[in-house]
Amino acid sequence: MPHWAPVNLPAAFLLHSVTPGVSNMIAKLAKTCTLRISPDKLNFILSDKVANGGVSMWCELEQENFFSEFQMEGVSAENNEIYLELTSENLSRALKTAQNARALKIKLTNKHFPCLTVSIELLSVSNSSRIVTHDIPVRVIPRKLWKDLREPTVPDADVSIYLPVLKTMKSIVEKMKNISNHLIIEANLNGELNLKIETELVCVTTHFKDLGNPPSASEDASQDRNPGQMAEVRIDIRRLLQFLAGQQVNPTKAVCNIVSNKIVHFDLLHEDVSLQYFIPAFS
């Protein structure tokens, strides 16, 4: 039975218009994740280095954009946070029933074990309402483990580039997966990005041009880097496909940051939700 830590119970009324989409995305990116609750933000975190092949994720929601009411008390005034481990699919399944809800409330409760209790008020055809409740088991993470769940440090990239349409990218990577388990992403400061697989029998490359580079990244790097010089990283193709499968809607902003032969960092903005996703180089 999970350990129940002595924290006060946060309660919230959720504006549910975007949240089912967010929880669906998280469920595709991580089987289990950590939900960090603070007075002004919610974060979904993945940082299980070994089990996920080094993949990490930091998804951030501004509290005021999703909640009409929000009350929480953390462990103490100095550590006003709560960290919960949960199965992503359980949260996604609960919130799917809330898409036409009149009101939605999420509360941390203790029902012999700690739960996120999701209460959904649904309107029937006759205009009467009924309440549907989901109890999602969670594990309250003790404070001594919080240090492992901080926002990842973003390394200085050799090249930053805007991504092509993610749906297009996904269909290409799906085909490449049938040929190789590894993929090379390479890009330069001329707005060019290549997806490449190499085996003993075949070499396949898909070229994207005129994608553009974020202004600040180009200025920082261009002083000592040839704009045509490619930065590349070789990664596990399944990790990239998992990331792309989680993106059901093309984001407002999508940037790929490459640290040569070390890591690729995807930085996405979906309206009020930001997502950072890190895939290390395949060793």
Image: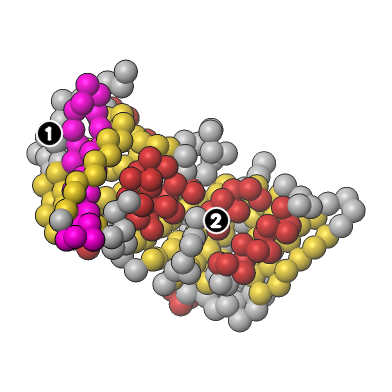
Position of 117 relative to 25 (above/below): above
Locate residue 209: give its quadrant: bottom right
User: Position of 212 compared to 111: left or right?
Assistant: right
Q: Residue at x 60, y 53 (%)?
A: 241
Q: What residue is shown with label 1?
A: 8
Q: Amino acid at mark 2?
A: Ala
Q: Residue at x 36, y 52 (%)?
A: 96
Question: Label 2 crowding class (10 Å Cα cut-off): few <14, some 14-19, many 20+?
Answer: some
Q: Residue at x 24, y 44 (%)?
A: 132
Label annotation for residue 245: 2
Of 256 and 132, nearer the camera is 132
Between marks 1 and 2 in the image, the one whose residue lies nearer the viewer: 2
Position of 42 relative to 110 (above/below): below
Position of 123 relative to 159 (above/below): above
Label annotation for residue 241: none
SS type, badge 2: helix
Of 185 and 169, nearer the camera is 169
Q: Residue at x 19, y 49 (%)?
A: 130
Q: Which residues are magenta?
A: 105-127
- Dominant SS in magenta: strand
